[in-house]
């Protein structure tokens, strides 16, 4: 028996999220079906574990999964073979044999998400489902400085119940955000969030709440009030999934997990510098 890790990129707009669901098209189902077709094993013998169960409509540049297989192939054969059977919205970027104690989910030390937001008076059809959109009157821009001030209240370990969906299956709302930065470039605003783990809809709820500040509808210290309320009703509505990307997952160095391949990313390279 061999344990294999895969790095994935996908456009999640056509899928009902990562996790298998009855009678729904999911990314996990598409991947497991492709692996089975490649190695010729019964589907019931294969189970993939992922680093992050992305929601419906959410994309990935650096998703990581692992599974156990009884057949041996070269790492490049795994990449080429599985990709042969995958839909074009999903692709394996690398494959690596890993120790038996590696777990894509529980061995991860940090997840990195990026939210790409396009703002302006008119939507951009070519960005449909690849970026979030916020309509702003001509000449108006979000107050990035105010959002950056508000984001400071979210750093560190907190109870993030105010940003947790009712369907969340996490055992605890206590999570740690290591970094939350916001960058503006013309009509684009990019949110970067790094943390040990995230609750269901947490990143989208954070973005939606910060946008209330950026539009001048709330002051930066309102975010502190929302966080301390520990109530989903205190925060802003969940923002659209379109612009959310799982950009990468970090693991202890001894596993030697490759970094996400960002060469074909729709996001600017400077977001990932350093």
Image (tube, rainbow, N blue to C red):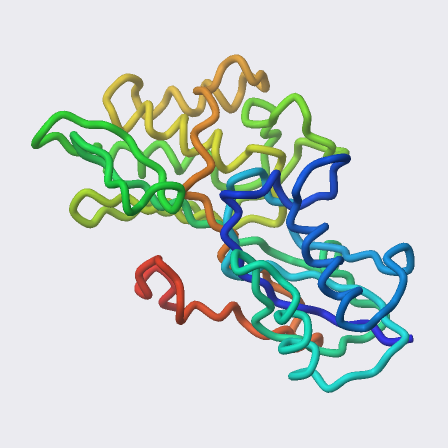
Q: Is residue 103 visible?
A: yes
Residue sitting at x 60%, y 68%: 92
Q: Is residue 197 left or right of residue 141?
A: right
Q: Is residue 144 visible?
A: no
Q: Is residue 249 left or right of residue 271?
A: right
The quadrant where residue 100 appears = bottom right
User: How far across and down, in percent of the image, does residue 51 sit?
Assistant: 67, 54
Q: Is residue 261 left or right of residue 256?
A: left
Residue sitting at x 75%, y 66%: 35
Residue sitting at x 67%, y 68%: 6
* Quadrant the N terminus occupies: bottom right
Depth order, front residue of 39/96: 39
* Quadrant the C terminus occupies: bottom left
The answer to whether 177 is drawn above or below residue 259 in the figure is: above
The quadrant where residue 94 appears = bottom right
The answer to whether 67 is drawn above or below residue 148 in the figure is: below
User: How far across and down, in percent of the image, does residue 207 sit?
Assistant: 41, 34
The answer to whether 178 is drawn above or below residue 73 in the figure is: above
């Amino acid at each position: 028996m061999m344990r294999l890790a895969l790095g994935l990129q996908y456009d999640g707009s056509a899928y009902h999220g990562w996790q298998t669901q009855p009678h729904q098209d999911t990314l996990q189902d598409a991947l497991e079906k492709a692996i089975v077709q490649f190695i010729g094993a019964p589907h019931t013998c294969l189970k993939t574990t992922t680093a992050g169960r992305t929601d419906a409509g959410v994309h990935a540049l650096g998703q990581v999964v692992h599974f156990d297989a009884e057949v041996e192939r070269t790492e490049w054969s795994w990449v080429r073979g599985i990709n042969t059977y995958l839909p074009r919205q999903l692709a394996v970027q690398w494959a690596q044999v890993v120790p038996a104690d590696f777990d894509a989910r529980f061995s991860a030390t940090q997840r990195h998400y990026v939210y790409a937001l396009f703002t302006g008076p008119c939507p951009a059809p070519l960005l449909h489902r690849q970026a979030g959109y916020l309509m702003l009157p001509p000449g108006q821009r979000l107050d990035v400085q105010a959002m950056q001030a508000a984001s400071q209240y979210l750093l560190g370990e907190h109870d993030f119940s105010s940003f947790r969906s009712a369907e969340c299956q996490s055992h605890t709302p206590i999570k740690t955000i290591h970094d939350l930065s916001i960058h503006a470039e013309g009509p684009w605003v990019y949110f970067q969030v790094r943390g040990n783990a995230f609750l269901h809809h947490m990143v989208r709820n954070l973005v939606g709440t910060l946008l209330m500040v950026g539009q001048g509808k709330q002051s930066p210290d309102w975010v502190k009030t929302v966080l301390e309320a520990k109530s989903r009703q205190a925060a802003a509505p969940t923002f659209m999934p379109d612009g959310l990307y799982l950009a990468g997952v970090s693991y202890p160095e001894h596993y030697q997990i490759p970094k996400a391949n960002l060469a074909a990313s729709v996001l600017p390279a400077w977001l990932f510098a350093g």
